[in-house]
Image (cartoon, rainbow, N blue to C red):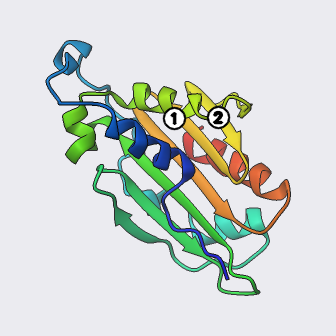
Amino acid sequence: MRIRTGLSGAFVVLALVLAGCGSGDSDAAAKGAPSASKAGKSEGACALLTPAEVGAKFGSTFGDGVPTRQETGADVCVWTSTSGTPAKTFSITVLRQGNVEGALKSSGLQVPELFAQAKAAYPKAEKIDLGDAAYATAGEVQVLDGDTWYSFSAYLGAGRTAVDGLKQLATQVVG
């Protein structure tokens, strides 16, 4: 059985981008301070959706989300189905400029720049009208909203239902 972890493809691209970034002595300070997050979006990723909301989009019962924090400072929440086989997973990864840590912080890149670099790896991605920029790939929806990058990812088996459900949940979270 294949189960996805909370690390989406776009964040794998992000790791590759960081590998080539060099030192943190860039002009990051000249780029300005990050904007404030929208009210109600400051909770952890698991507070953004309930298991019932996730289950309603994907036709399964899901347990409580399991939160983790990546070395980059990104908050991740992974929900796993509690019924049926194979197991289905859904995750949200949220990277806010004010939470950036480690090598990502020392790179000096801002979250919108990182999003743009990751998006460049998917030239045939479907554009979505959400947030400041958004796109969908097979099993993922990526959204940039101000200085916050939301990554919605699912392993639900094959089919268009996954991307459609991800788009609906992304719209619900980002607005």
Q: In this view, does 157 lie above or below 48?
A: below
Label 1 crowding class (10 Å Cα cut-off): few <14, some 14-19, many 20+? many
Q: Quadrant of residue 103?
A: top left
Residue 66 in sight from this viewpoint: yes
Please tell me which residue is depicted at 69% across the width and 27% down the height of the picture. 129
Image position of 92 (left or right of 163):
left
Using the numbered discs, state the Cα–Cα distance from disc 2 to disc 1 in whole angstroms: 7 Å
Identify the residue position indicated by label 1 in the image. Answer: 118
In which quadrant will I find the N terminus?
bottom right
Q: In the displayed structure, would residue 45 be above or below residue 89?
A: above
Which residue is drawn at the image coordinates 17% and 29% (left, top)?
24
Q: Amino acid under label 1?
A: Ala
Task: Determine the residue located farthest toward the top in the rendered image.
Answer: 30
Q: Position of residue 36 (x, y in %)?
A: 31, 30
**What's the residue at 66%, 35% (across, down)?**
135
Q: Name the residue nearer the viewer: 67 or 36.
A: 67
Q: Which of 87 and 15 is in front in this view?
A: 15
Q: Name the residue under label 2.
A: 122
Q: Is residue 45 left or right of residue 86?
A: left
Vertical arrangement, residue 142 with respect to residue 45, above or below: above
Amino acid under disc 2: Tyr
Q: From the image, which quarter does the C terminus lie in? A: top right
Q: What element carries label 1?
A: helix
Q: Position of residue 18 (x, y in %)?
A: 34, 38
Residue 109 image offset from top left, x and y in percent: 30, 27
Expressed as whole percent of the image width and height from the top left, the position of residue 117 reads 48, 29
